[in-house]
Amino acid sequence: MTAHQNGTISSEVSDFLLNCFARSPSWKFWLSLPLSFLFLLAMGANSVLLITIRLEASLHEPLYYLLSLLSLLDIIVCLTVIPKVLAVFWFDLKSISFYACFLQMYIMNCFLSMESCTFMVMAYDRYVAICHPLRYPSIITDQFVAKAAVFILARNGILTVPIPILSSRLHYCRTNVIENCLCANMSVSRLSCDDVTINRLYQFAVGWTLLGSDLILIFLSYTLILRAVLRLKAEGAVAKALSTCGSHFILILFFSTILLVFVLTLVVKKKVSPDVPVLLNILHHVIFSALNPIVYGVRTQEIKQGIQRLLKKVW
């Protein structure tokens, strides 16, 4: 199996070439430094958050365990995507092996839906905390978090497996040049000589089923939270209740907005440069990962105090 640098294939593909921002080559230069900064920020901030939650006994609570899972997912996604993108930007290392490409495809699809599912569980946590505060300790337990984590891993891990499998079983005979910085399913399967209808339908169905159901349940949770909050009569109770889920809501809003813009650019792709969805896809993986620990660190008093105590111990 051979794949030549000029993009022509003599037999079957053994590796792919990531042709990043072919129509806008100057973007590589302008993006490399901000992307590097965001990557280091995401890795550093999430690591600090994980260490703080691990070492601070006061943070050994269900909500912070879920936050730890979110940080862990962010770190893995960043490590899967960004170093390869920067290698293409800086050293023109476009080649990615056949199996590495489909592994990256799986991790991107699987972990994106895992993050969405984690947000859904966190929304339920906030719903119970605000709407049923007396029952919160008996409902949201460590056992509940363990079961939720198993559900998050199993649901998304299993349902996204067919995406790379279906793509890897296609016959690639035209070219090995992917017009993308990442091994996105549609960008890769487009190179195949086979019919990719099943791939597209499965990607669409799984995407809307997983992400769509999560967003509906998140919206329902916050609707019930808002209704409960507006009924509170005590002075300052509304502000206090809203502040407890403010960080969560900000991140969900950002997460869903970026996804929506990404989908819209794909829908109207004839009117925008093909490089725009690629850029949005990269930024979604790194900006959200960097924002997550910072928003929680700044807005959550317990985490802020935990980080301060950790820094005092270190220094």
Image: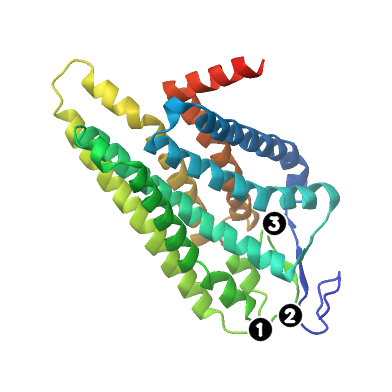
Which numbered disc flags the more N-terminal residue, 2 or 3? 2
Which numbered disc flags the more N-terminal residue, 1 or 3? 3
In the image, residue 33 lies at what x, y percent?
Answer: 74, 36
Task: Find numbered disc 3 in the image and state the secondary structure of the residue it sits on.
Answer: loop
Pointer 2 residue: 174
Q: Amino acid at mark 1?
A: Cys
In the image, residue 244 lies at what x, y percent?
Answer: 33, 28
Which numbered disc flags the more N-terminal residue, 2 or 1? 2
In whole angstroms, how far apart are the C-alphas of marks 2 and 3? 19 Å
Do residues under tags 2 and 1 come within 8 Å of each other at their CB atoms?
Answer: yes
Residue drawn at 60 percent across, 43 percent down: 286
Pointer 3 residue: 181
In the image, residue 210 lies at what x, y percent?
Answer: 40, 60
> Can residue 191 be seen in the rendering of this structure?
yes
Quadrant containing the C terminus is top right
Pointer 1 residue: 193
Task: Find numbered disc 2 in the image and state the secondary structure of the residue it sits on.
Answer: loop
| Above or below for 198 versus 89 | below
- In the figure, residue 7 lies in which quadrant? bottom right
| Above or below for 262 versus 185 | above
| Above or below for 154 versus 47 | below
